Amino acid sequence: MSDRAPATPASLWLRVLAGIYDLLPLLGLWFLAGLLALALTGGALDPHRGAHKLLVQILVLLLTAVYFVLSWTRGGQTIGMRAWRLRVVRTDGSSLGAARALLRFFIALISLVALGAGFWWALIDAQGRTWHDRATDSKMVQVAAR
Protein backbone atom coordinates (compact mmCIF):
# COMPACT_ATOMS: atom_id res chain seq x y z
CA MET A 1 0.00 0.00 0.00
CA SER A 2 1.32 3.41 -0.88
CA ASP A 3 1.39 5.90 1.98
CA ARG A 4 -1.20 8.02 0.22
CA ALA A 5 -3.52 5.35 -1.17
CA PRO A 6 -7.14 5.49 -0.03
CA ALA A 7 -7.92 2.82 2.52
CA THR A 8 -10.86 1.35 4.40
CA PRO A 9 -11.21 2.46 8.03
CA ALA A 10 -10.48 -0.35 10.49
CA SER A 11 -13.42 -1.63 12.50
CA LEU A 12 -13.35 -1.45 16.28
CA TRP A 13 -13.47 -5.27 16.32
CA LEU A 14 -10.23 -5.55 14.30
CA ARG A 15 -8.59 -2.95 16.55
CA VAL A 16 -9.50 -5.02 19.60
CA LEU A 17 -8.12 -8.20 18.00
CA ALA A 18 -4.86 -6.42 17.16
CA GLY A 19 -4.67 -5.11 20.73
CA ILE A 20 -5.11 -8.60 22.14
CA TYR A 21 -2.38 -9.88 19.84
CA ASP A 22 -0.10 -7.01 20.97
CA LEU A 23 -0.34 -8.31 24.53
CA LEU A 24 2.15 -11.04 23.59
CA PRO A 25 5.15 -8.78 22.86
CA LEU A 26 4.04 -6.44 25.64
CA LEU A 27 4.18 -9.27 28.18
CA GLY A 28 7.82 -9.78 27.23
CA LEU A 29 8.54 -6.08 27.61
CA TRP A 30 6.80 -5.98 30.98
CA PHE A 31 8.90 -8.93 32.10
CA LEU A 32 11.96 -6.94 30.99
CA ALA A 33 10.71 -3.98 33.03
CA GLY A 34 10.64 -6.23 36.10
CA LEU A 35 14.18 -7.41 35.40
CA LEU A 36 15.37 -3.82 34.97
CA ALA A 37 13.70 -2.84 38.24
CA LEU A 38 15.34 -5.81 39.94
CA ALA A 39 18.74 -4.73 38.59
CA LEU A 40 18.20 -1.09 39.56
CA THR A 41 17.36 -2.08 43.14
CA GLY A 42 20.40 -4.32 43.42
CA GLY A 43 18.27 -7.45 43.58
CA ALA A 44 16.23 -6.14 46.51
CA LEU A 45 13.02 -5.36 44.61
CA ASP A 46 10.10 -5.32 47.04
CA PRO A 47 6.74 -4.71 45.31
CA HIS A 48 5.23 -3.76 48.69
CA ARG A 49 7.52 -0.72 48.97
CA GLY A 50 5.97 2.31 47.33
CA ALA A 51 9.17 3.46 45.61
CA HIS A 52 9.85 0.01 44.15
CA LYS A 53 6.27 -0.38 42.96
CA LEU A 54 6.43 3.06 41.33
CA LEU A 55 9.74 2.14 39.65
CA VAL A 56 8.18 -0.96 38.07
CA GLN A 57 5.12 1.00 36.96
CA ILE A 58 7.24 3.73 35.36
CA LEU A 59 9.38 1.15 33.54
CA VAL A 60 6.28 -0.72 32.30
CA LEU A 61 4.75 2.54 31.05
CA LEU A 62 8.00 3.63 29.41
CA LEU A 63 8.60 0.33 27.59
CA THR A 64 4.96 0.16 26.49
CA ALA A 65 5.16 3.71 25.10
CA VAL A 66 8.41 2.91 23.28
CA TYR A 67 6.83 -0.20 21.71
CA PHE A 68 3.85 1.72 20.32
CA VAL A 69 5.67 4.91 19.33
CA LEU A 70 8.42 3.03 17.48
CA SER A 71 5.89 0.75 15.79
CA TRP A 72 3.68 3.63 14.68
CA THR A 73 6.55 5.79 13.42
CA ARG A 74 8.39 2.94 11.65
CA GLY A 75 5.81 1.58 9.25
CA GLY A 76 2.64 2.50 11.14
CA GLN A 77 2.06 -1.01 12.50
CA THR A 78 2.53 -2.91 15.73
CA ILE A 79 2.97 -6.68 15.60
CA GLY A 80 -0.74 -7.14 16.28
CA MET A 81 -1.67 -4.64 13.61
CA ARG A 82 0.48 -6.50 11.07
CA ALA A 83 -1.32 -9.75 11.88
CA TRP A 84 -4.70 -8.12 11.18
CA ARG A 85 -3.43 -5.96 8.29
CA LEU A 86 -4.03 -2.61 10.01
CA ARG A 87 -1.96 0.57 9.82
CA VAL A 88 -2.02 3.96 11.51
CA VAL A 89 -1.64 6.92 9.16
CA ARG A 90 -2.38 10.62 9.30
CA THR A 91 -5.68 11.60 7.70
CA ASP A 92 -3.77 12.74 4.58
CA GLY A 93 -2.21 9.26 4.30
CA SER A 94 1.28 10.23 5.49
CA SER A 95 3.17 8.62 8.37
CA LEU A 96 2.92 9.66 12.00
CA GLY A 97 5.86 11.52 13.48
CA ALA A 98 7.21 10.75 16.96
CA ALA A 99 5.38 13.62 18.69
CA ARG A 100 2.00 12.60 17.25
CA ALA A 101 2.65 8.95 18.02
CA LEU A 102 3.50 9.79 21.65
CA LEU A 103 0.39 11.97 21.98
CA ARG A 104 -1.65 9.16 20.41
CA PHE A 105 -0.27 6.70 22.98
CA PHE A 106 -1.13 8.88 25.98
CA ILE A 107 -4.63 9.72 24.74
CA ALA A 108 -5.26 6.01 24.09
CA LEU A 109 -4.10 5.37 27.66
CA ILE A 110 -6.58 7.97 28.95
CA SER A 111 -9.24 6.30 26.80
CA LEU A 112 -8.53 2.96 28.47
CA VAL A 113 -8.63 4.47 31.95
CA ALA A 114 -12.02 6.01 31.06
CA LEU A 115 -13.41 2.46 30.68
CA GLY A 116 -12.56 2.44 26.99
CA ALA A 117 -14.74 5.47 26.23
CA GLY A 118 -12.26 6.82 23.70
CA PHE A 119 -12.30 3.52 21.85
CA TRP A 120 -16.10 3.11 22.01
CA TRP A 121 -16.27 6.56 20.42
CA ALA A 122 -15.38 4.87 17.10
CA LEU A 123 -18.84 3.28 17.09
CA ILE A 124 -20.57 6.67 16.91
CA ASP A 125 -17.98 8.65 14.97
CA ALA A 126 -18.96 9.14 11.31
CA GLN A 127 -15.43 8.18 10.21
CA GLY A 128 -14.98 5.41 12.81
CA ARG A 129 -12.23 7.34 14.60
CA THR A 130 -11.31 7.08 18.28
CA TRP A 131 -10.32 9.91 20.62
CA HIS A 132 -6.64 9.29 19.91
CA ASP A 133 -7.29 9.23 16.16
CA ARG A 134 -9.09 12.57 16.31
CA ALA A 135 -6.58 14.24 18.64
CA THR A 136 -3.64 13.31 16.43
CA ASP A 137 -5.29 13.81 13.03
CA SER A 138 -4.79 10.13 12.30
CA LYS A 139 -6.79 7.03 11.48
CA MET A 140 -6.40 3.28 11.56
CA VAL A 141 -6.99 1.65 8.22
CA GLN A 142 -7.11 -1.85 6.77
CA VAL A 143 -4.20 -2.66 4.49
CA ALA A 144 -5.04 -4.52 1.29
CA ALA A 145 -3.71 -8.07 1.05
CA ARG A 146 -0.65 -8.39 -1.15
Image: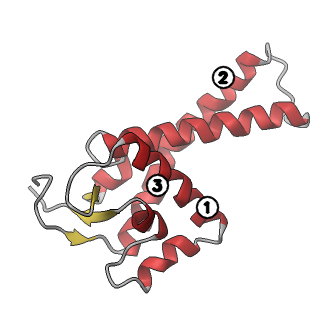
Whether label 1 touches label 2, CB < 8 Å: no
Left of 127 or right of it: where is 57? right
Where residue 109 sits in the image (x, y, percent)? 58, 57
Q: Is residue 54 above or below residue 40?
A: below
Where residue 130 sits in the image (x, y, percent)? 44, 71
Mark 3 → mark 2, Cα distance in angstroms: 26 Å
The residue carrying mark 3 is: 104
- Crowding near the residue tagged with mark 2, few <14, some 14–19, many ≥20 C-alpha atoms within 10 Å: some
Q: Residue at x 61, y 61 (%)?
A: 110
- Mark closer to the observer (3, 2): 3
Q: Residue at x 42, y 77 (%)?
A: 122
Looking at marks 1 and 3 on the same chain, the residue that comes earlier in the sequence is marked by 3
Instruction: Name the image quarter holding residue 116.
Output: bottom right
**The residue tagged with tag 2: helix, strand or loop?**
helix
The quadrant the C terminus occupies is bottom left
**The residue tagged with tag 1: helix, strand or loop?**
helix
> Which amino acid type corresponds to the residue marked 1 in the rendered image?
Ile
Where residue 135 sits in the image (x, y, percent)? 45, 63
The residue carrying mark 2 is: 36
Left of 10 or right of it: where is 122? right
Left of 49 or right of it: where is 13? left
Looking at marks 3 and 2 on the same chain, the residue that comes earlier in the sequence is marked by 2
> Which amino acid type corresponds to the residue marked 2 in the rendered image?
Leu
Along the line of sight, the residue nearer the viewer: 86 or 99: 99
Mark 1 → mark 3, Cα distance in angstroms: 10 Å
Q: Residue at x 87, y 29 (%)?
A: 46
The residue carrying mark 1 is: 110
Q: Which mark is drawn over residue 69?
A: none
> Which amino acid type corresponds to the residue marked 3 in the rendered image?
Arg
Q: Residue at x 55, y 35 (%)?
A: 63
- Mark closer to the observer (1, 2): 1
